[in-house]
Amino acid sequence: MADIAYRTASVDGLNVFYREAGAPNAPTLLLLHGYPSSSHMFRELIPLLADRFHIVAPDLPGFGKSDMPARGDFDYTFEHMAEVIDRLTEILGLDRFALYVFDYGAPVGFRIAARHPERISAIVSQNGNAYEEGLSEGWAPVQAYWKEPSQANREAVRMLVQPETTVWQYTHGVPDETRVSPDGYGLDNFYLARPGAVDVQLDIFLDYATNVALYPTFQEYFRKSRPPLLAVWGRNDPYFLPAGAEAFKRDLPDVEVRFLDTGHFALETHVEEIADAIREFLAG
């Protein structure tokens, strides 16, 4: 078992929780989680990689054990979250690292990469989208909210923060649901039940439109900087389609694309396969 430390860093007054494992002088891998999870989603991946890599896995602001300031005291945008994580890497002295990005972690990580291409050694995108064709019809209510951020459209996306939706996100597209531990979605629903958490998440849904607007910027970064990229994808993801993984080939001819017969939270069912793919990819 890996020796994992559970730490908190102050980032301009905001407490950011993170998990850390592996030798500090080993190549660093920064793990960025998605919605509605936290670094807890990497609980089984970290021990499989910590013998070879220095692992840092933070909770984004408003998620997990990181601070969740009141909406009036913190700007819950992807740009702000990226600024916080970017600053965290500087505080921790991470001057060069590989990224593992998933779901929300993708636009956060891609923002950092586009801002500091010299710091990024490689990218692993696990259902981390950067192309419009990767967005499924499941985004329709959220896209309507982007176009008209009315109270009615805000209420229409509230179903995405319901406990049963969290469970569905974990189990949809999984051939054998008994392989999905209830620990992940149980903890996510615990955090979503905190006072004020739902409205924070609805604000973040609204701001996701800024990520789509930045897709051309991310794609330009791929073309200009040519980071080695592995796209490992749960092919049955109800939100991010396989076309989003294939689209990386337009801008990165050497991208490696692998599909797994599972859903959105691929680590819940295929952690060993993903760990093996990462070790092979980063070794190359």
Image (cartoon, grey):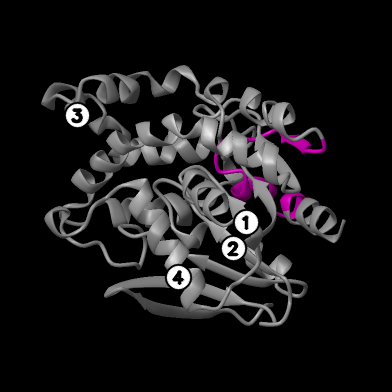
Which numbered dot is residue 6? none
Between 44 and 200, the residue placed more toward the observer is 200
Q: Rate crowding at label 2 as few (under 14), some (14 to 19) or many (20 or more) other CA atoms within 10 Å.
A: many
Amino acid type at image mark 2:
Leu
* Residue at 37% in and 47% down: 78
In the figure, residue 187 lies in which quadrant?
Answer: bottom left
* Residue at 37% in and 18% down: 140
Mark 2 vs mark 4: in front: 4
The residue singled out by tag 4 in the image is: 88
- Quarter of the image containing the C terminus? bottom right
* Residue at 77% in and 72% down: 52
Q: Which SS class for mark 1?
A: strand
- As drawn, 246 above or below 123: above
The residue singled out by tag 2 in the image is: 30
Q: Which residues are magenta?
A: 254-274
Mark 2 vs mark 3: in front: 2
- As drawn, 61 above or below 192: below
Reply yes or no: does residue 16 show up in magenta. no
The residue singled out by tag 1 in the image is: 99
The residue singled out by tag 3 in the image is: 154
Amino acid type at image mark 1:
Leu
In the picture as drawn, the residue positioned furthest to the front comes out as: 224
Dot 1 or dot 3: first in sequence order is: 1
Dot 2 or dot 1: first in sequence order is: 2
Marks 2 and 1: CB-CB under 8 Å?
Answer: yes
* C-alpha distance separating marks 2 and 4: 11 Å
Amino acid type at image mark 4:
Leu
Reply yes or no: does residue 265 show up in magenta. yes
